[in-house]
Image: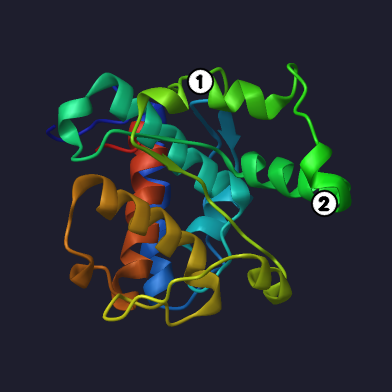
Amino acid sequence: MGDLEDEDHPVEVNAYAAAGATMENKKKKDYSILLSIEVDIGYLHADKEWFESLVQHGSWLKDMHIDVAFYFFHKWIIEKPPAFSQNFTTTDTMVWKNMKARWEKHAKKWNKFQMQADDILVDYVNGLHPIPSMKWSEVDIVYVSINSGDPKSEEQWDIERLHDVPQQEYDGDCGMFLIKYAEYLMHDHPLSSLTGSRIDWFREKMATELSYFKILPM
């Protein structure tokens, strides 16, 4: 894109410089200089704290970090379907929270539970939320991010343990692993290249793309 001059693109230049400064100090394990920018990304207004937790080594990602990534996944599958190897859509983290809430409330009488027509989960299935989205009946795969929060809840699921797949090295890397696992599967990329040693780079890449381009390129 060539060199950017401050007077031509002040917002983009400042955002890119701030992200670069943060990453350079991150290499020195100095977090005293962090992003001071605020940008609008799709439906999100991202501030310093949001970017700080995104780029900091070992930091837990927030639900909104995952939601932003999944937002761009389903945005691009609608606009550029040939770029992916799967016919899919995504949801946000609220889907699982709503499903879990329904189960906890009606578990004892689950066989009698009836979903109301105005339930937000119906909107998800019909492609009305989040926007843009697709009807679940029109896709082959629906990506749902699930955080059980309680190891005991795993007993309610049939879990298939896969071998020879990358594993996270730090507890706080699970969110970025989730994002990259989904992205790799969508593009049919080999999972062997998704290693724990690359997670910090993925964090920096996502922060720079969002602060500079205001999107996540596919």
- Is residue 36 at all visible to an observer of this figure? no
Q: Residue at x 77, y 48 (%)?
A: 103
> In this orientation, which residue lies closer to the viewer: 207 or 137?
137
Q: Amino acid at mark 2?
A: Ala
- Image: 150 above or below 179: below
Quarter assignment of residue 52? bottom right
Q: Earlier in the sequence, mark 1 or mark 2?
A: 2
Q: List x then y, in percent, for residue 119.
A: 74, 24
Q: Which residue is pictured at 17% across the width and 33% down the height?
A: 83
User: Is label 1 or label 2 in front?
Assistant: 2
Q: Residue at x 20, y 72 (%)?
A: 192
Question: Mark 2 = which residue?
Answer: 107
Q: Residues within 10 Å of mark 1 (few under 14, many from 20)?
A: many
Q: Residue 68 location in percent, x, y? A: 49, 39
How dense is the environment of label 2, judged by Cα within 10 Å: few (below 14), some, or many (20 and up)?
Answer: few
Distance between mark 1 and mark 2 Cα atoms:
26 Å
Residue type marked 1: Gly
Q: Is residue 107 left or right of residue 213?
A: right
Which residue: 54% across, 67% down? 158
Compared with 112, 136 (above or below) is: above
Q: Secondary structure at mark 2?
A: helix
Q: Which of the two residues, 74 or 109, is positioned nearer the viewer here?
A: 109
Q: Which residue is mark 1?
A: 127
The one nearer the camera, 26 or 119, is 119
* Secondary element type, mark 1: loop
